Image (tube, rainbow, N blue to C red):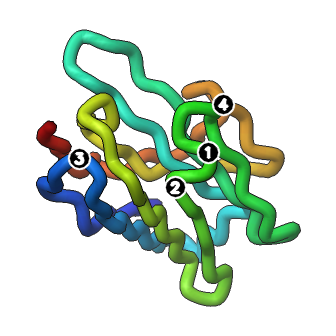
Amino acid sequence: QVSLVESGGGSAQAGGSLRLSCVASGNNYRPDCMGWFRQAPGKDREAVAGVSFISGQPIFRDSVRGRFTLSGDYSKQTVWLQMYSLKPEDTAIYYCAAGSCPFYFTQSWAQYWGQGTQVNVSS
């Protein structure tokens, strides 16, 4: 049984910051890549960012590049999504995901999902 457990999130005002964490565990599973997706009300789930534990290089969707950072620790099977300069349009449920590298900006890339954590950004 593989488990992805997210923490962090909550509420912030526009321009503020929040940090999300995700830990992968179970069945000796050690993913090569982990990432974050989000789903706003009435919208499809979209990829936000992904990182390879092999290269350490994160990649971001255009709308968050320069505002979000993504880092990971392979030994802890943990990734952190630091969100700065938050905008109301960042409001969504954020899901941690894990899979094989390379990371792709599509839901079908993910082999495992977390339960999701809510992020609310007010104007």
State the SS at label 4: loop
- The residue indicated by pointer 2 is 68
C-alpha distance separating marks 1 and 2 = 6 Å
Going from N to C along the chain, the mark reached first, 4 or 1, is 1
Identify the residue under disc 4.
105
- The residue labelled by disc 3 is 14
Spatial CA span between label 4 and label 2: 16 Å
Tell me the tag on residue 65: 1
Give amino acid for label 3. Answer: Ala
| Proximity of marks 1 and 2: CB atoms separated by less than 8 Å | yes
Task: Give the SS element for disc 1.
Answer: loop
Of the residues shown, which amino acid type is indicated by label 2? Answer: Phe
State the separation of the CA atoms marked 3 and 4: 25 Å
Identify the secondary structure beneath mark 2.
strand
Numbered tag placed on residue 20 in the rendering? none
Residue at point 49%, 47% (across, down): 36
Which secondary structure lies at badge 3? loop
Labels 3, 2: front one: 3
